Image (cartoon, rainbow, N blue to C red):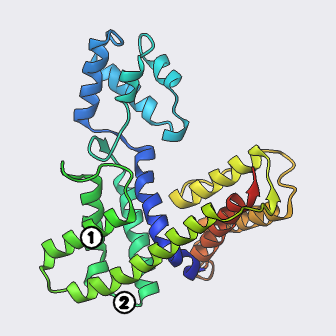
């Protein structure tokens, strides 16, 4: 399923980069800014050390699960919405997990190397690592969130030029032309699905939709895949197929057998394809 994964590469890369903020923590400067803001608003009266512990507790919860009420319980009294909004993190004021960044670098490098059949220096781990570092530590004139594939390409081109000048312009242009073509295909398909009449092929309950979305997110972010929320398991054939693929994926995640490890990316791509189709084709 490497082919399917490659065809989704631009969108998956966007998702993976932006997902880094889901588990990020405030930088030391941002943490101190929040501490002073809470003091000014009479929301906190204790030490900075204790405030830091509360911050860690709040940001240990995945971003999509955080609620204002969670923050209010950690402070001396409920915060107003302006203060709560200040707890929003972007790449300029957050510390992202370096291991998660390197996972993206490794994934992108291997997928490009295999799909493009090249070991060009422009797709090396070093170049891609520097590109991701630039994106996740942006200077003032660059975007700090909602990163698009075009933003990645612009940072990548800048990094190659900074390292090598114009020496590898031809190689980089050839690779980027293919990637831009892939991205255009994705955008056109998304636009077509929005404009044409939609006829659902499966009905999913909200519980089933939420589970499918959670599975998709966990596979993209390489986090534990959630179990189906109902004890009897999924009952619809397509959901049962997805559940079987997930069980196989969990096996290859734990194995050290080379003959199984080589199938991991294909199984992962299959799960993403199943989730995408279910979420696109279901009646809501």
- Give the answer, above or below, for where 140 lies relative to 238: above
Q: Residue 11: x and y, percent?
A: 48, 65
Number of on-image labels: 2
Residue 205 placed where, x, y %?
79, 47
Q: Quadrant of residue 244?
A: bottom right
Q: Secondary structure at mark 1?
A: helix
Q: Which mark is residue 118?
A: 2
Give whichever of discs 2 and 1 has the lower sequence position. 2
Image-based side of 215 in relation to 55, left or right: right
Q: Kindly identify which numbered label has been placed on residue 166.
A: none
61 on left or right of 233? left
Q: Position of residue 163 (x, y in %)?
A: 14, 74
Residue 201 vertical placement versus 36 (above, below): below
Give the camera-side residue of 172 and 230. 172
Give percent across and percent down for residue 60: 46, 36
The residue at 45%/45% (across/down) is 22
Helix, strand or loop at mark 2: loop
- What residue is drawn where x is 26% and y is 59%? 133
Image height of 148 relative to 209, above or below? below
Asked if marks 2 and 1 touch (Cβ < 8 Å), the reply is: no
Residue at x 38%, y 60% (from the top left corner): 148
In the figure, residue 203 lies in which quadrant?
bottom right
Residue 100 visible in this rendered orientation of the protein: yes
Question: Which residue corresponds to mark 1?
Answer: 156
Residue 62 seen from this side: no
Q: Is residue 47 left or right of residue 203?
A: left
């Amino acid at each position: 399923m490497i082919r399917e994964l490659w065809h989704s590469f631009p969108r998956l890369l966007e998702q993976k980069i932006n997902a880094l903020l889901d588990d990020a923590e405030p930088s030391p400067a941002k943490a101190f800014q929040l501490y002073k803001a809470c003091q000014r608003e009479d929301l906190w009266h204790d030490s900075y050390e204790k405030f830091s512990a509360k911050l860690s507790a709040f940001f240990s919860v995945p971003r999509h699960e955080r609620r204002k009420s969670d923050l209010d319980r950690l402070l001396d009294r409920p915060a107003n919405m302006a203060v709560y909004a200040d707890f929003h993190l972007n790449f300029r004021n957050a510390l992202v997990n370096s291991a998660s960044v390197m996972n993206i670098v490794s994934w992108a490098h291997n997928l490009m190397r295999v799909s493009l059949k090249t070991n060009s220096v422009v797709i090396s781990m070093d170049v891609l690592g520097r590109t991701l570092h630039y994106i996740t530590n942006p200077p003032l004139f660059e975007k700090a969130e909602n990163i698009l594939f075009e933003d990645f390409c612009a940072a990548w081109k800048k990094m190659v030029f900074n390292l090598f000048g114009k020496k590898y312009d031809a190689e980089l242009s050839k690779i980027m032309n293919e990637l831009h073509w892939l991205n255009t295909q994705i955008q056109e398909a998304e636009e077509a699905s929005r404009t044409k009449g939609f006829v659902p092929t499966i009905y999913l309950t909200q519980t089933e939709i939420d589970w499918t979305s959670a599975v998709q997110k966990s596979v993209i972010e390489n986090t534990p895949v959630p179990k189906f929320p109902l004890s009897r398991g999924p009952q619809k054939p397509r959901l049962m197929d997805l559940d079987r693929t997930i069980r196989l994926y969990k096996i290859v995640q734990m194995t050290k057998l080379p003959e199984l490890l080589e199938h991991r990316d294909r199984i992962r791509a299959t799960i993403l394809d199943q989730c995408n189709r279910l979420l696109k084709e279901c009646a809501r």
